[in-house]
């Protein structure tokens, strides 16, 4: 929200929708200091592998602090997972087509590149950012993996897409190969690993084919403000610090990675960094029962999503979560401890709690300068929905 980089690139226009979406940035500005730039200046080798999706050429990983970029560009999904990884004129950069790699599945190829880089730079500190394109459309698994999952489908199963399951297996194998080479190079005990996702599973494909997955018991999926869209795995391995098998229920968000990794590396935040929205997770990594020094975490999405979501903002404070829908400014309130599936809207029964969270959300939007959509004079009228009284007659920060 602070950078006005709030949608996928190039975005999705709906000229007849009730709201006009803001003119948001479609690239990560070069003047913003990235994690790769900070670590590189401290002597780290920095490499990016996989999805980038943060702007056109000139804003690619090697323009943002990474010494090496393999397969990262403006594309949000690969032209194809099958060799030679292209469709028409679209292709992924820096994936040389050699006899050795002929017919290699894309995720296997990215794993091979990760193994090569780790072996080459094992004697120096490194940041290796692997943004595997999986699991993302196009749904193109390794064909030999599919029969196993077709045979596993049973009546009543909610996760019943064999192609999607086969793609998850390939991603899992990539992780396994990275862990194995760290062991091989005797780096495992001094390497911190973060495994997470950018959004919840995709639950709608429309005319493109069967729905890829189901996030049950979470509600909805990618693009949605409900837990199926924003709640993702986070697994961290930090040998000698994190107790094996421990879990933590403290809500965290991706902007926390920047201060967390700087603290782990023993680096101070450079003064030219500017405001940092996240907080370091080191306290909860060391003690999963501790709590982070903040009141809430926030989301802001002033766009229409192809999956069906309309513009919204959301706030989570403890077990409470409030969603504000910008078309008519109505809100929904959920207690996630009691209702992880977000089935019972409590806004009408608990107006004071809803008003408190809404005020927090508005105050946060104002503090970060969030862009807001505006009424569209040529658009359709928003559907009516119950709402709390609000001073905001039209969407404002």
Image (tube, grey):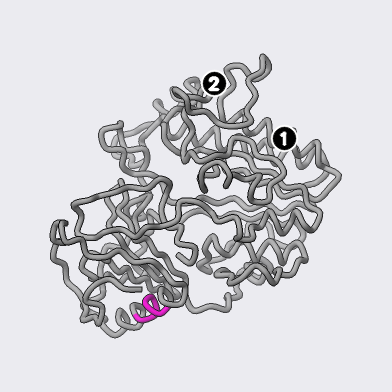
The residue sitting at the bottom extreme is 352
**Residue located 28% across and 71% down the image:** 395
User: How many numbered marks have been drawn onto this rendered protein structure?
Assistant: 2
**Residue located 58% across and 72% down the image:** 275
Q: Relative to 360, is 99 on the left or the right? A: right
Residue 306, above or below 354: above
The x, y position of residue 228, in whole percent, is: 38, 54
Of tags 2 and 1, the one toward the viewer is: 2
Dot 1 crowding, Cα within 10 Å, few <14, some 14–19, many 20+: some
The x, y position of residue 25, in whole percent, is: 45, 56
Query: Residue under circle 1?
Result: 115
**Residue located 52% across and 28% down the image:** 91
Check disc 1 and report its element: helix, strand or loop: helix
Query: Residue under circle 2?
Result: 83
Q: Relative to 247, is 315 on the left or the right? A: left
Is residue 375 covered in magenta? no
Q: Quadrant of the C terminus?
A: bottom left
Using the image as rendered, state which of residue 127 and residue 90 is in the foreground: 90
Q: Are marks 2 and 1 in contact (CB under 8 Å)?
A: no
Tell me the distance, in whole angstroms, between the alpha carbons under discs 2 and 1: 19 Å
Q: How would you classify the magenta stretch by its main secondary structure?
A: helix
Q: Quadrant of the N terminus?
A: bottom left
First in sequence: mark 2 vs mark 1 = 2
Q: Relative to 20, is 233 on the left or the right? A: right
The x, y position of residue 220, in whole percent, is: 32, 52
Magenta stretch bounds: 359-363
Dot 2 crowding, Cα within 10 Å, few <14, some 14–19, many 20+: some
Using the image as rendered, state which of residue 378 and residue 387 is in the foreground: 378
Residue 257, above or below 163: below
Check disc 2 and report its element: helix, strand or loop: loop
Quarter assignment of residue 349:
bottom left
Using the image as rendered, state which of residue 176 and residue 363 is in the foreground: 363
């Amino acid at each position: 929200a602070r950078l006005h980089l709030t949608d996928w690139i190039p975005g999705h226009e709906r000229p007849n929708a009730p709201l006009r979406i803001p003119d948001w940035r479609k690239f990560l500005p070069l003047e913003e200091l990235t994690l790769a730039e900070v670590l590189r200046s401290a002597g780290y080798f920095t490499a990016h592998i996989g999805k980038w999706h943060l702007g056109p050429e000139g804003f690619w990983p090697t323009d943002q602090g990474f010494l090496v970029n393999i397969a990262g560009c403006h594309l949000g999904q690969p032209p194809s997972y099958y060799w030679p990884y292209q469709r028409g004129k679209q292709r992924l950069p820096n994936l040389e087509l050699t006899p050795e790699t002929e017919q290699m599945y894309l995720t296997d190829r990215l794993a091979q590149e990760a193994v090569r880089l780790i072996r080459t730079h094992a004697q120096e500190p490194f940041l290796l950012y692997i943004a595997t394109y999986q699991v993302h459309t196009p749904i193109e698994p390794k064909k030999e993996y599919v029969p196993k999952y077709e045979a596993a489908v049973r009546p009543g199963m909610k996760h019943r897409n064999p192609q999607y399951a086969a793609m998850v297996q390939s991603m899992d194998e990539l992780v396994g190969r990275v862990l194995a080479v760290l062991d091989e190079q005797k780096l495992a005990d001094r390497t911190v690993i973060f495994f997470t996702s950018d959004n919840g599973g995709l639950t709608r494909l429309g005319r493109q084919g069967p729905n890829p997955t189901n996030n049950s018991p979470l509600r909805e999926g990618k693009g949605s403000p409900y837990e199926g869209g924003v709640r993702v795995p986070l697994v961290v391995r930090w040998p000698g610090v994190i107790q094996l098998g421990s879990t933590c229920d403290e809500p965290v968000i991706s902007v926390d990675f920047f201060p967390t990794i700087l603290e782990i590396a023993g680096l101070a935040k450079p003064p030219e960094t500017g405001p940092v929205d996240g907080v370091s997770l080191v306290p909860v990594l060391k003690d999963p029962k501790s709590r982070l020094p903040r009141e809430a975490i926030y989301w802001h999405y002033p766009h229409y999503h192809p999956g069906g979501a309309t513009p919204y903002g959301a706030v989570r404070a403890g077990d409470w979560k409030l969603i504000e829908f910008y078309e008519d400014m109505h809100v929904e309130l959920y207690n996630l401890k009691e209702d992880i599936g977000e089935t019972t809207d409590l806004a009408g029964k608990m107006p004071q709690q809803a008003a408190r969270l809404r005020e927090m959300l508005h105050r946060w939007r104002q503090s970060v300068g969030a862009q807001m959509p505006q009424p569209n004079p040529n658009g359709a009228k928003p559907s009516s929905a119950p709402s709390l009284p609000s001073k905001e007659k039209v969407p404002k920060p």
